[in-house]
Amino acid sequence: MGPCSSKYKSEKGAAYRHQFVPASGVGGMPVVRQGPLKIIIAGAPASGKGTQCENIRERYGVVHLSTGDMLRAAVAAQTDVGKQAKEYMDSGMLVPDEVIIGVVKERLDRPDCKKDGWLLDGFPRTPAQADALAEAGIKADCFIFLNVSDSILVERVVGRRTDPVTGKIYHMTFSPPKDEEILARLEHRSDDTEEKVKVRLEQFHANIGAIKGNYADMTIEVDGSKKPSEIAANIESEIKKMVGDRAVYVN
């Protein structure tokens, strides 16, 4: 083991979390990189964002953040913006963009995000939110878009079933349970119908074009209809192209 290897080892044995190997490095020795990765990922319902977020989190060591999780955490911590969000949530009203941006900004300012970088999952959802992020000084290194045709998305959603005991999601065509007992208790979400998913897709399409326009110089568009492993490999390759030597791996 080289003299610098143990310095970069984590408690779990992951090496090189905060370093890169330059294309023309001296003797192939690792060099500390210029900052953590900051990634935004977007995709329609059932585009496979959840799977790819997990892959990205494991591969690069970034903090995975969804709007829902951040809102709930801010409310639980009773921060100033969390208290504002709670007022809207308790009254059944939508939390306004300025409060959501405040929650996001507060979360991204925490030590783990500054140290390890972050992955914003499905946010921003509207052009106004994208503009507000920019005005707040929150900038990403790359914007990943999982592109999947509506026909495939509808098929994915309509076939989904949830096991109420374990919470695991199955698909009646692509990944049905082998156990007859599990099969018998599967539930079909009321909003996982063709009619309702088409409404959600219309809303998504109404916003995504303008959102992508905000990140035109850093967009990574990936074919989300491929196998998850192929999508993950494409994302990794494109991130490397986008950020070069700043692409960091956690093994």
Image: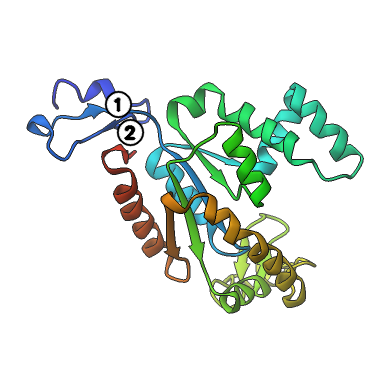
Q: Where does the N terminus fall, quadrant-wise?
A: top left
Amino acid at circle 1: Lys
Query: Percent position (x, y) of residue 58?
Result: 42, 43
Above or below: residue 188 compared with residue 112: below
**Along the line of sight, the residue nearer the viewer: 13 or 82:** 82
Query: Percent position (x, y) of residue 239?
Result: 35, 49
At horizontal 59% and vertical 70% (from top left) the residue drawn is 177
Determine contact: label 2, label 1, CB under 8 Å: yes
Crowding at mark 1 (Cα within 10 Å: few <14, some 14-19, many 20+)? some
Above or below: residue 8 compared with residue 104: above
Crowding at mark 2 (Cα within 10 Å: few <14, some 14-19, many 20+)? few
Q: Secondary structure at mark 2?
A: loop
Q: Secondary structure at mark 1?
A: loop
At horizontal 34% and vertical 38% (from top left) the residue drawn is 250
Residue under numbered circle 1: 9
Q: Which mark is residue 14?
A: 2
Query: Percent position (x, y) of residue 173?
Result: 57, 78
Specify whether residue 125 is in view.
no
Quadrant assignment, res 6:
top left
Amino acid at circle 2: Ala
